[in-house]
Image (cartoon, rainbow, N blue to C red):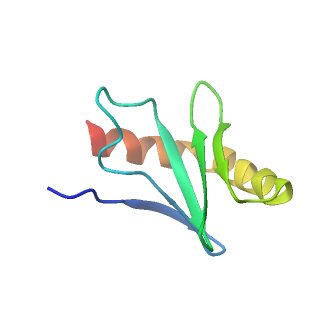
Amino acid sequence: MGVTMPVIFRYQGFKYFFYSNEGNPLEPAHVHVRAAGKEAKFWLSPEVSLARNDGFDARTIRVLLEVTERHRQVMEDAWHDYFA
């Protein structure tokens, strides 16, 4: 079975998703954000925080962090529904 990338949220051209094979054992809840060949990873708990940034500038990361915080519950619910 191949790796899928369920998209759980979109914001102004940014795609929030996770990989269907997030590790063994499963990593803590997080999302990846991708746009224009760049990608970032945000942990969702215990609080939203940047795990990795591959190409976004600091201003964009701040915006993505705010959006992630604002929609955290939707993202956590999607994570737990998928991996339950």
Above or below: residue 9 compared with residue 72 = below
Task: Name the side, left or right, on which 41 lies relative to 17.
Answer: right
Residue in the image at 60% along x and 42% along y: 42
Residue in the image at 76% along x and 53% along y: 61
Task: Name the side, left or right, on which 57 lies relative to 53.
Answer: right
What is the x, y in percent for residue 12? 66, 74
What is the x, y in percent for residue 6? 36, 59
Residue situated furthest left in the rendering: 1
The residue nearer to you, when weighing 16 against 34, is 34
Residue situated furthest right in the rendering: 59
What is the x, y in percent for residue 70? 68, 49
Residue in the image at 30% along x and 26% along y: 25
Q: How many labels does the image show?
A: 0
What is the x, y in percent for residue 10? 55, 67
The residue nearer to you, when weighing 41 against 69, is 41
Above or below: residue 63 compared with residue 48 = below
Q: Quadrant of the N terminus?
A: bottom left
Above or below: residue 33 compared with residue 81 = below
Quarter residue 14 falls in:
bottom right
Q: In which quarter of the image is the C terminus?
A: top left
Task: Name the side, left or right, on which 46 lies relative to 78.
Answer: right
Task: Name the side, left or right, on which 82 lies relative to 41.
Answer: left
The residue nearer to you, when weighing 1 against 82, is 1
Quarter residue 55 falls in:
bottom right
